Image (cartoon, rainbow, N blue to C red):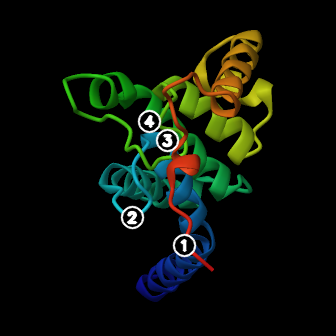
Amino acid sequence: MRERQASHNARRAREFEAFVAGAAGRLLHAATLLTGEAPDDNPRARRLLTLALAHTYACWDRMRGEDPYDHARQYLATRFARGAWHQYGGGPGRGRPHPRSPLAVLTPQERLIVVLRLYEGVAEEQAAALLGLPTERVHTICDRATATLLHPRRGQTPAVASAKVAPS
């Protein structure tokens, strides 16, 4: 019995390690876009990723055919959504997007919807269900955020445009 349990735990650990090796980079990038941090300085995104991976590992045996990436992404998104008001929206200077973030001009809710819809390719209906919003609201927010990114107001320079290009 003890050997069987040890074998099961070892297999579970190997499967999870393989999952993390394949998915952690993309999940970290999504978390970095959500938090609006600089790609090379993203402690909040790393914390979000750590929490999502820990939750996924805790649920690993109960997933039974469920996609672990989808599970981790859902946890990442809902954890960000719940914490966005307190962590990312409050206090002077606290949680403000980094100017080098490509989504710095968006609100936390807009970043969440843009990341889910455009970066992760989550269907509008799925994003709406995940966030507890009407599908039309998700559509409207995504359209508004996309317009903001494509056509910034005067005086707002997108992070990508303000990056210096090295001479060739």
3D distance between C-alphas at marks 4 and 3: 8 Å
From the viewer's side, name the closer residue of 22 and 93: 93
Q: In the image, what residue type sits under mark 2?
A: Asp
3D distance between C-alphas at marks 2 and 1: 18 Å
Residue 37 vertical position relative to residue 151 in the rendered view, above or below: below
* Mark toward the start of the polypeptide (2 vs 4): 2
From the viewer's side, name the closer residue of 42 and 2: 42
Q: Residues within 10 Å of mark 2 (few under 14, many from 20)?
A: few
| Residue on which the image places disc 4 | 80
Q: Residues within 10 Å of mark 4 (few under 14, many from 20)?
A: many
For residue 47, which numbered disc appears in the image? none
Q: In the image, what residue type sits under mark 1?
A: Ala
Residue 88, how many percent across, how many down? 33, 31
Quick check: marks 4 and 3 in contact, CB under 8 Å?
yes
Q: Residue at coordinates 22% horizontally, 31% vertically from top-left?
A: 93
Residue 37, how many percent across, how many down? 39, 48
| Residue on which the image places disc 1 | 166
Q: In the image, what residue type sits under mark 4?
A: Phe
Camera-nearest label, 3 or 2: 2
3D distance between C-alphas at marks 3 and 1: 27 Å
3D distance between C-alphas at marks 2 and 4: 19 Å
Q: Residue at coordinates 44% horizontally, 52% vertically from top-left?
A: 55
Residue 107, how many percent across, how many down? 48, 24
3D distance between C-alphas at marks 4 and 1: 35 Å
| Residue on which the image places disc 3 | 34
| Residue on which the image places disc 2 | 40
Quick check: marks 4 and 1 in contact, CB under 8 Å?
no
**SS at circle 4:** helix
